[in-house]
Amino acid sequence: MSKIKSNIKKKRKRKTTSVNTTANTTISNSRTQDSAAKIIFGNNKLCSEFLRDYTGIELLKDVNEEDLEDMTTRYIPMFTEERDADVVKKVRLHNGEFAYMIALIEHKSSVDYNVSMQLLRYMVYIWEDYEKEQNKLHEGISKTKDFRYPPILPIVYYEWTDEWTSAVDFRDRIFLNDVFKEFIPDYRYKLIKLESYSEGELIERNDEISFVMLVERLKNSNEFTKLMADLPMDYLNGISGMSTRDVMRVISDVLAAMLRKRLVSEDKIAEFTDKIKEKPMGQLFEHWDNGPDLALIEKGREEERKNTEAERKRADAAEAENRRLREENARLRAGVK
C-alpha cells in the first residue's frame, strides 16, 4: 500500500485544466444502474479519463475533456429503451483529425450475444448521418474518390462478474463465414471488463474514473464498507481535491444509484450524498455506517437471483438455437464442398 501511496503523489502532478463541458445528466430511465452508467460516461472529464487510461489506444493517450463533444442526443433515434445507457462522443484528436466513439455500456447479468450486430447498426447509422451532413456542405462529395468516413471506436464496458463469452469479431456471428469470408463485413469491438482490474490497480491510476469503477465493482453493502475502510486516505482526499463541482456531483449520483440498488433507505442516501459536497471524502468515509435493513437486502438478493436465473434460461435457449444453426451450417458446408 505504501507503493500505491507513492504513486498517488506522483500522479497528482498530472492534473489537467478543468473545463465545464459536462453533458446533461438528467436521466429518465427505469434502469437505475444503466442511468448511473450514462451519468458516468456523459461527463466529459470522466469519459476522457476512461478513453485515455483504459482503452490502450496510443492515439487517445493525450485526450482531455476539451477534446470531447457529446453527440448522444443527435443519435437518440438509434437507441432503444433497452440500451438507453449508450453514449456517443465525438473525439478531436491532437493530430487535427477527429473520430467518433461509441461506448456501449453493458449492465446485464448475462452476456449479450448480439452486441456486435447492434454496434454495427450504430456505426452504419453514424456514417450515414456523416455522409448526409458532408453532402449538405459540399454537394456530391461522398461520391468522390478521396471522400473518407470517420473512424468509430466501438466499446463494450462490461461490469458483471461472469465471463464474457460473446464473440468480439462480427464475422463470428455469420454462419458459413469460412466460405464467404471475403464478402462479410469484418470488425471487432473493444471489450473492457471491469473485473479485470484489481482494487490496487484502480487505486494506482489515481483519477476520478478509478474511484467510480471501484464503486461500480461492489456487489453489496458489506463490500462498500470494507472498501471505504481499505482505501488510502490521501487517495480519497486527492479525488476530492482534483475534482470539479460537476464531477463531484456525478460521483454523488453514482454512489446514490449504487446505494439505492443495495436497498439503503432514501433518507440515508440523501444524508450521505449531501455530505460529499461538504467535506473531503477521506473524512466522510472514516466512520461509514449505512445501517441497511438486512431483511430488505435478502429480499433484494432473492429477486436478483430470480432475474439472473431467467436471464440464464433465455441465454441457454439462445445457445441451443445457435447449436442447431451450427449443425445446419456444417451440413450446408459439406454440401458446398
Image (cartoon, rainbow, N blue to C red):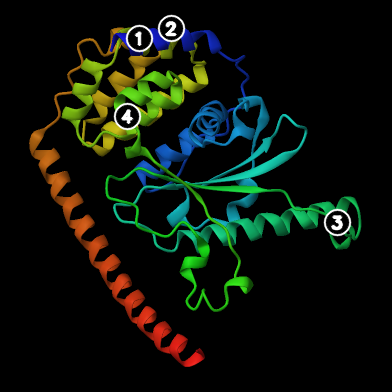
Disc 4 and disc 3: Cα gap in Å?
45 Å
Numbered circle sitting on residue 215: 4
The residue at the point 63 percent across, 25 percent down is: 62
The residue at the point 50 percent across, 32 percent down is: 50
Quick one: 25 or 128, which is closer to the camera?
128
Q: Which one is closest to the eye, mark 1 or mark 3?
A: 1
Q: State the image coordinates of residue 337 (x, y, percent, origin top left).
A: 50, 89
Q: Secondary structure at mark 2?
A: helix
Disc 4 and disc 2: Cα gap in Å?
22 Å
Disc 2 and disc 1: Cα gap in Å?
6 Å
Label 2 with label 1: CB-CB less than 8 Å: yes
Q: Earlier in the sequence, mark 3 or mark 2?
A: 2
Q: Earlier in the sequence, mark 4 or mark 2?
A: 2
Determine whether, in the image, residue 31 is placed left or right of residue 183: left
Q: State the image coordinates of residue 44 (x, y, percent, origin top left).
A: 57, 30
Q: Secondary structure at mark 3?
A: helix
Q: Which residue is mark 1?
A: 5
Q: State the image coordinates of residue 23 (x, y, percent, origin top left).
A: 58, 33
Q: Secondary structure at mark 4?
A: helix
Quick one: 252 or 210, which is closer to the camera?
210
Vertical side of 319 occupied by 200: above or below: above
The residue at the point 72 percent across, 39 percent down is: 98
Crowd around label 2: few <14 · some 14–19 · many ≥20 (10 Å): some
Q: Earlier in the sequence, mark 1 or mark 3?
A: 1
Where the N terminus falls, by quadrant? top left
Q: Which residue is mark 2?
A: 9
**Amino acid at circle 3:** Asn
